[in-house]
Amino acid sequence: MSKFMSKSIMNTTLNYSPNFYVKKRKVKEIKFIIFHYTGMKKQNQAITRLTDTKSKVSSHYLIKNNGEILTLVPDLYVAWHAGVSSWKKYKSINKYSIGIEISNPGHEYFYKNFSKKQIKSILKLSTYLRKKYKIKSNFILGHSDIAPDRKKDPGEKFPWKYLSKNKIGHWHNLNEKKLFKKRNQIVDKLEKNKFIKNLYKLGYPKNILFNKYKYSKLLTTAFQRRFRQELVNGIIDQECLFISNYLAKNMK
């Protein structure tokens, strides 16, 4: 065991990764929890990759299929899970976040529902971290929120609505029947611009390097994976606009 490591307070299994910055950060620097899926065919492949020096990737925790929680990197060290990313004024989210990987093959390998045991552990671990580091609900995010041009995880099967009832991330409390009636209803150019402005207000990153139309579609897809999970098509409609208006007003 490295001299930099310390035993986790939670009941987790230690499976340390060498992939982290050895300089400790301050507790007050931890602002985010970022959820990922592993995106590999087999769970053991993901664990091997996250603990292999050659991969140069890691996370603080990994939640296995059976709900077991592995500690890979202690909280006060910067793990390498977010890559090029931003949210609101924060850039390079690795510096400010705790990364949680959840075992799931992801979109590339037959994306599946997260197990009940996994969801139970997600709630337990994230609640513990939220309280310990006083993390705001709107700073509990998915990888696709902070890097919508690159990432899809944890995806539209991630239980954001359920978790939000326990202050893990945000959701909306809009009437689902009324929302459904707005689905696939077209929006005009001004409404499209309003939708994108709402997303920037929430914290989604701007990207001047991408074609404006292409990036708008990527942003919309990321938003849908998070807040309109039943239909992810990258198309802005009245339902998406209505949800974004509500969140821009209430998600602080």
Image (spheres, rainbow, N blue to C red):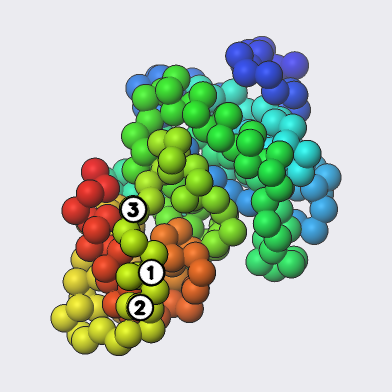
Position of residue 85 in the picture relative to residue 154 (left or right)? left
Give the class, few, some or many, for how many residues have Cα within 10 Å of label 2's Cα (few <14, many ≥20).
Answer: few
From this view, report whether residue 176 is shown above or below residue 65: below
Residue 97, image quadrant: top left
Q: Visible in this render: residue 178?
A: yes
CA gap between label 3 and label 2 equals 16 Å
SS of the residue at dot 3? loop
Instruction: Report the front residue among 20 and 223.
Output: 223
Q: Is the C-beta separation of discs 2 and 1 under 8 Å?
A: yes
Quarter of the rendering occupied by the N terminus: top right
Q: Determine whether, in the image, residue 109 is placed left or right of residue 170.
A: right
Secondary structure of the residue carrying tag 2 is: helix
**Which residue is painted at 63% across and 51% down in the image?**
37
Residue tagged 2 = 181
The furthest residue to the left = 190
Q: Nearer the viewer, mark 3 or mark 1?
A: 1
Q: Amino acid at mark 1?
A: Lys
Residue 193: give x, y in percent of width and height: 21, 75
Helix, strand or loop at mark 1: helix
Q: Which mark is residue 173?
A: 3
Measured in 3D between alpha carbons, the distance from the residue under mark 3 to the one under mark 1, in whole angstroms, is 12 Å
The residue that disc 1 covers is 177
Q: Residue 53's x, y, as percent?
A: 72, 39
Query: Residue at 43% of width from left, 77% of height from top?
Result: 234
Cα separation between marks 2 and 1 = 7 Å
Q: Is residue 37 above or below residue 66?
A: below
Write the residue at 48% across / 78% down: 233
The answer to which of marks 3 and 2 sits earlier in the sequence is: 3
Q: Position of residue 36 (x, y in %)?
A: 58, 49
**Is the Cβ of the residue at disc 3 closer than 8 Å to that at disc 2?**
no
Question: Relative to 170, does residue 186 appear above or below in the rendering?
Answer: below
Image quadrant in which the C terminus is located:
top left
